[in-house]
Amino acid sequence: MSIRLPRGTQDILPGQVEKWQLIEQKARELCHKFQYQEIRTPIFEHTDLFLRSVGDTTDIVQKEMYTFDDRGGRSLTLRPEGTASTVRSFVEHKMFGQANQPVKLYYMGPMFRYERPQAGRFRQFVQFGVEAIGSDDPAIDAEVIALAMALYKEMGLKKLKLVINSLGDKESRAKHREALIAHFSPSINEFCSDCQSRLEKNPMRILDCKKDREHPLMKTAPSIIDHLNDESKQYFKKVQQYLTDLEIEFEVDANLVRGLDYYTHTAFEIMSDAEGFGAITTLCGGGRYNGLTEEVGGPEAPGIGFALSIERFLAALEAENVELPIDQSIDCYIVALGEEARDYSVGLLHKLRHAGYSAERDYSDRKIKAQFKAADRMNAKYVAVIGEDELKNNKINLKIMDSGEQKEMELASFIQDFTALYRN
C-alpha cells in the first residue's frame, strides 16, 4: 500500500519553494523597516490558551482545533493561529516591562485547523503575522495595516480591496449585544444550531455564520457602527484619517466582525478583486485586541495585529499573473572528461563554492553532450570544461553560455580569473 500525505496538507517542491522564500524574504525586509522583530513560539500550546483568547464560541475552538492529551493527561492543541501564542509569550517573558513600547513582533510558521480543504485553504497552512502590543494609539493601527498593504503591493499585487470596521470598546459592544439579541431572538429557531447557542453567549458571532448568511435578518441586523460611543467613534475616525494620510484606500463595512472573540475597535480585511480568484476573497485579516493580555494573566497592554496565509498570497499572485523574479540559474557547471579530470573537479567545485559561487558538476559519468544538456537545464551562466589534456597543460576552457564565447584560462589561477570575468 502506498502512503500518501494527509488530506489538507501539501508538499512544497523545488521550483515552488523559491516563491515561498521570496515572500518570506520580503516580509522580513519590511518588518525590519517597520522595526518589528521576529518571535518563534511552540507549535503546540495548552488548550486553555485558545479557549481564553480565541473564544469558546468561535468555529475555530468548536470545530477546527487539533487537540490531544499528552502522556501526563494535559490537554494540548496545535496552534490554530499566531496571536494567542505571541501574547502569551509577551506576558510570560514580561515584555511589557521593556523600555521601548509598543513591543513590535512578527512570526512566520505553520498553523493547523481541521476544516474542509479547498483552493488556497489547507489544514496545515503557513501564516505570516505581526503584533504591536502596548499602545492604544490609532496611528499604530494604521501602521499595521500599511505594513500588510505594502507587502502585497511590493510583491506585485494590484487588485486589492481594504475593508475596515470598528467593533468598539466594551461599553459599545454591550449595547450592540443587547440590540442583536433583541433582533434575532424572535426568529432564532430559523437559524442553525450554532447560531442558536451563540445568541446569549456571543450574538456577534451570528453575523459571521456561513450557513445562515442569506437569512433576511442578517441584512437588517443592528450595526455596531450605530452603537459606538463617542470615544469609539473618535478612535475609528482617527484610524480613517491616518489611512487617508498614508494614501491607503479603504471601504467601511459595518458587517465585518472577524472570526475571533478578542477583537475590539479596529477590524480589517484585505481582499483580492482579481477575476477568477475564487469565492473566498480574503487574503489577510486583523484587528485590535485590547484586553487580551489580561485574559492570559498579564497586565493591561492593548495590541493590534494581522495574519495572512502564504498559500492564499501565492494564489492571488497567480490570479493576477504576477511572475515572481525567481533566479533558478547557477553560476558555473563543471564538465569533466576522464577519471583524472573528474577527480580534480571535486576540489575545483569546492573552491568555486567557497569563493561564493553556485556551482555543480556531473555525478553520473556522462558524455560531454549529456553534461552540456545538464548545464542548460540548470541555466548555467558559464560552463568550465576540463579533460586529461587540460590537466596536463594546466588549462581550463570556459564557455560563456549567453554568447557562446570561449576563453582558455590557467587552471592554477582559474578562481581569480573567473571572478574577474564574472564581475565584469
Image: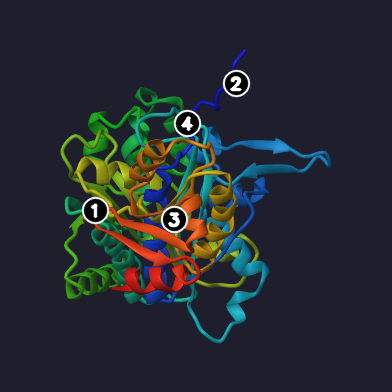
Give residue 3's mark. 2
The answer to whether residue 396 shows anywhere in this view is yes
Q: Nearer the viewer, residue 89 or 397?
A: 397
Instruction: Give whichever of discs 2 and 1 has the lower sequence position.
Output: 2
Instruction: Looking at the image, tell me whether mark 4 or mark 2 is earlier in sequence order.
Output: 2
Q: How much space separates mark 3 and mark 2, taking CA atoms? A: 30 Å
Would residue 117 appear left or right of 402 to someone viewing this image?
right
Q: Which labelled disc corresponds to residue 369?
A: none
* Quadrant where the image shows the N terminus: top right
Describe residue 140's horizontal placement relative to residue 90 as left or right: left
Residue 13: which quarter of the image?
A: top left
SS class, disc 2: loop
Residue at 26 percent of width and 29 percent of height: 215
Left or right: 74 as drawn, with respect to 308: right
Task: Judge depth for marks 1 and 4 and give the one in front.
Answer: 1
Secondary structure of the residue carrying numbered label 4: loop
Query: In the rendered structure, which disc, 1 or 4, sits on the residue that comes first in sequence?
Result: 4
The dot on residue 128 is 3
Question: x, y percentage for residue 120?
Answer: 36, 37
**Residue type highlighted by circle 1:** Gly
Using the numbered discs, state the Cα–Cα distance from disc 3 to disc 4 in whole angstroms: 20 Å
**Residue contact at pointers 2 and 1, CB within 8 angstroms:** no
Marks 3/1: CA distance?
Answer: 44 Å
Query: Which residue carries the number 1 mark?
Result: 404
Pick out the residue farthest to the right: 72
N-term-proximal mark, 3 vs 2: 2
Which residue: 49% across, 81% down? 101
Q: Earlier in the sequence, mark 3 or mark 1?
A: 3
Three-letter amino acid code at the position of disc 3: Phe
Mark 4: amino acid: Glu
Of badges 3 and 4, nearer the viewer stands 3
